[in-house]
Structure formats: C-alpha cells, structure tokens
Amino acid sequence: MPRRASVALVVVLAAAFSGAVGHVSARQSQIASERPSGPTVDFIALDADGSPVAELQPPEVEIRIADRVRTVRTLRRVAAAPGTVPGAPPRVAPPYGTNDNVAAGRRFVLVIDQESFAAGRELLFRNAIEGLLADLTPADRTMVAALPFGGVMVPFTSDTARIRLAAGRVTGQGSRAETGSDLACRTRRFLESLDGLLRDRGTLESPQTLVVFTGGLAGPRRDAPMGVLPGMCELLVDLFRQVGSAASAARANVYVMSPADPTITASLPRQTVGGASDIGSDNPLEGIEHVTGVTGGTRLPLDAAGTGSLLRIAKESSAYYVAELEPVSGEVFGRSRRFSVRVARRGVTVRARPEITLTDTVPARTTRLTVPDILGSTEAATDLQLRVGGFTVRDPDGKLRVGILIEPVDPSVALASAGAILIDDTDRVVTHWHARDATERPLIGALSVPPGPYRVRAAAIDAAGRPGAAEIDLDVGLTQVGALSLGSLLLGISRGGVTSLQLEFGSELTARASFDIYGGAAGQKLSATLEVSRTLDGPAMAVVPLALTRADDTRVVATGVVPLGALAPGDYVVKGIIRLEDGTTGRVVRTLRKVAK
C-alpha cells in the first residue's frame, strides 16, 4: 500500500480523536419532500422453535384489513429485548448496529383473576411471575393488576422487587364449592374489569404483552331455562367481543395461563329432551377458549414449577415486526376491523390479533427532541435510519480510546446533531460524546474507557427533525500476540490517496483494511496477511499481503486491500493475521457487508 494512503488514514483517526476534524467538501442537502406516511400494524412471526424470525421481506407478508389486501410499503423488525438471537447463532458477528438492534423494551401487563384461585393456590401464579422476572431486562416495564377488586397493584416498573411484592399481595378469593351460576357471575365481573383496564390504556403506538392468570372462565350462557327470562348471571357473547376490541386497541398480545387441573364447578342439571333446565355449560375451559379466540391469544399451562410457559412468553415477545401500509383513500381510523397476517415462508407461525384499530398520524410533539433525550431513553427511535460501528485504538500514553462511527442509511440525509454513550455490563452510562459538527463524513467520535464489554447507543437527528438511535455491543480492548498488541481492524474506501472509514459497501471494487500494531522490539521479524472468508474459522476465499508502515515510535500500521468486485452480496469475515518468528499467531477480525446496488 502506498505510504501516503497509510499515513492519511492515521491522520484521519488522530484528527477525530483530538476533536480537530476538518470539514468535508460540502454539506449534504436536506430532503426536499417526504411522502405521506401510511398506517402501521404490528405482528409476531416465529420459527418452529419459538424464536422470532429474522429478515422477513415485504413481498413475503400478506396483510388484510377488513378482507382487503393492503400493500406493505416497509417492514421493520423491532428487537424488544437486547441480546436476543433470532434462531440459530449467527455465523459471523454483525458488521454494525442499526435501529433494529435497539432494545425497545417490552411492556408486560400481568393480570390475576382473583376469584378464580382458591386460597392456598396463589403459588401457581407467583411462581410463574418469579420465573418471568429472571428474564426481564432494565428496558422492560411490568404492571401487575388483580381483577376485579384489587385493581392495579403496581404500575409499570422495571423494579423486580416491587413486581414480586405486588404479586405476593394478591390472595385467592375463589370458592371451593362454586356453582355454575357463581362461575358465570365471577366471569362477567372479571371480563368487565379487564375490558375497563384495557380501555384505560387507550390506543397505543407499540404492542404490549397481556398475561392473564385464571383458574377458569365460563363460556357464554343464559343461566336460566329456555322459555323464561335470562338469569342474573347471564354471560353474553358481546362481552367477550368487547374484550377482544379493547385488546386490539391496546395492541395487546394475549396469553392466558390456567392450571392443568382447573376447579370443576358443582354439578347442575342439564338440558332435557323437552328443553328444560337449559342453563349453559359449567366447563371452566370454555370461557378461556372464548377469550383466546376473540383476542387471537394463546393458552399456556400454569404448572407447579411455573417457569416454562413464562420463559416461552419472554422468548416470543423478544422481537416483533412493524409494517407500514400504503395509504388508501377513505381510510377508517379509530374503529376496530378484521385483521389477518400471512407469511409466505415454510414453518413460520404468525401471532396477530384478529382485529386492528388504526390510528391517524401521530400528533406533533409539543417539545422538540434532542440527542441527549434520545440517548437517555430506553425507547427505540426509528424515524431516522442509522448505522453505528465501534473500534478500539491506543493513545501514545497507553490509554484506550473507543472510536464511534455513525452513518445515516440514506447518504443524502444531512444530520443536524449526533452523539453516543457507552453503557457497561451493569447498565451504567460510563461516558458520552456529542458531535461538534454532525455533517462531517465520516462522522467519528472518540471516548476514553477502561477495557471491557460495553453497549454503544448512538443517536442523531436530521435536518428535518427526525430522530434515530442505533446500538451495538462492543468489547473494548487490544489483542495480544506475544509482546505485541493489535488494535481493531478498520474498513474503509480510498479516494485520492485519502482513506475514509465506512460501515457498508456496495459497488466499490475494493475496500481498505488496516489495524495498528503496538509494542515489540525494533527490527522484530513478523509476517502479516489479510484473509477473507465466509465464516470466522472457514477457509480463506482470498489472501493478500499486508503492508507495514511505521507511524511513530510505538505504533506500526498494517494496511491491505480487500477485493470486493467478485464477491456476491452478503456478510464476510475479514481477518488481519500476524505471525511472529517463533510461530506465535494472532488475528483481529471484522465483518464486512456487501449489498447489491
């Protein structure tokens, strides 16, 4: 590699880390106009093992509203829980973080049907909730409600101690000698209170997971013989339908958990051949089937151990899809309509509510968001699509610095402000950075931190005011090879002898790879090569030599060329390999993504 290209890359990094980065030749122009946004709907798509499906494309999804097929304009996967793995472990690490990697956080509403559990059976739902607590993340929020009498025991919180305490305060109020009429009356009370709880939640922009713990519910019944007026505990089908509509408006994905041995009510007379004594069924599973039917929910067993089913719920709720639909004239908002989702992929199970309530465009915010607002929130910000990458270098004084590279997915977008924070493994923000000029390309920030695992959260706002946030996990540290230390492998493109860092590649014929080598004795013999493969330990598809250029007394820069022209779109592992004279070998790796353009 020519010496001037190598030195240019070093200068770019040094300038970024000192804060004295020069302006790019011209600012990117603001998007002149934006197409009107369409309504959005959400659904869950699961693989055979219950893991959320990865990389669904709009042509694979058919969405019907009121039996009308709607055109899916965009499809976005939202990771609700951090660190989730959509299926089998990936063959390579992600090349960068995007908005889809942001842990949006889940909303769990745990509802306990007090009157369905007799005193002494509270351990069934308490153990189940305890099993869920182990899988909650700091971004998750959980509410506990006891219906119909207790109400909200604790509002949405991430404090597991408060959740545990609230569940422990709920006591069973069921009768061990319940008649069919008692079953119908308490079912009606529970459904009415559940309907009220859901309607108080209003129409939400993001889905929530509603877990109902019940010992059994009655199905629709007159509670009186035919030919006479209905009894006082008549249970209409419309009440179940109202709960379904309320769950639709609240974007609630419903799970009903009931014991494997539900309490059977006292035996009562059944309808005779002449039609007398028609009071309805006393089967406590009928009402559960009706609730899951009208909400599109799933029934799961509530066993003595209590953890298995809740872990399944935690797994299934870890990611969901949001589809933006093409707007149509005369769109109906604020009213529940039939809704269905089909995915044209073998072995995929779709979880979608049978009804949907579309909302009109989200009202404008009364206050303008800032980058610190976005960085300090656990919510996903997806209006502006971003990419973020990170790498480690060492200062001359031996301290480590983390470089943060931020890119808008649309290169024509002009960023108005940008910044990043580093979060350690205890979820504590350890340092932050704010861009002096967010229009710089490449946009690089620098942060000083001790070695260790971190989560990078980067945020930006474009000139049109659209916010975005992207996250990626990063291990900060150097790679030891004997007496040498290796910095992170960096990828970029070279134009006019100047190398600029880049996170994604398309039509470029080559990419520039480089990393720093620290320490070692003067004149130490070593060899350096660059390999490209499909997997971390797979065979090399290309092997090229690395040029070694001394940057200063403590640092040598290894640079090489990655041939891209013959590579098909996809992810590849680029490995910088150092071999010492005594046979000691070490490597640094980075994933390169090539896309079709």
Image: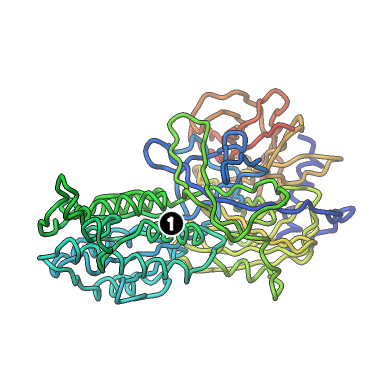
Task: Tell me the residue at 62%/67% (across/down).
Answer: 374
**Quadrant where the C terminus is found in the figure:** top right
- Would you say residue 452 is visible in this rendering? no
Task: Tell me the residue at 43%/54% (across/down).
Answer: 253
At label 1, which amino acid type do we have?
A: Gly
Pick whichever, 327 or 294, lies toward us.
294
Pick whichever, 320 or 571, lies toward us.
320
Q: How many marks?
A: 1
**Image location (x, y in percent) of residue 591:** 59, 39
Label 1 crowding class (10 Å Cα cut-off): few <14, some 14-19, many 20+? many
**Image location (x, y in percent) of residue 80:** 49, 55
Task: Tell me the residue at 50%/46% (across/down).
Answer: 480
Q: Residue furthest right?
A: 25
- In this rendering, position of residue 269 left or right of residue 501: left
Q: What colouring style does the render use?
A: rainbow
**Quadrant where the N terminus is found in the figure:** top right
The image quarter in which residue 203 lies: bottom right
Q: Is residue 158 above or below residue 398?
A: below
Q: Tell me the residue that label 1 is attached to.
A: 244
Pick whichever, 594 or 288, lies toward us.
288
Q: Secondary structure at mark 1?
A: helix
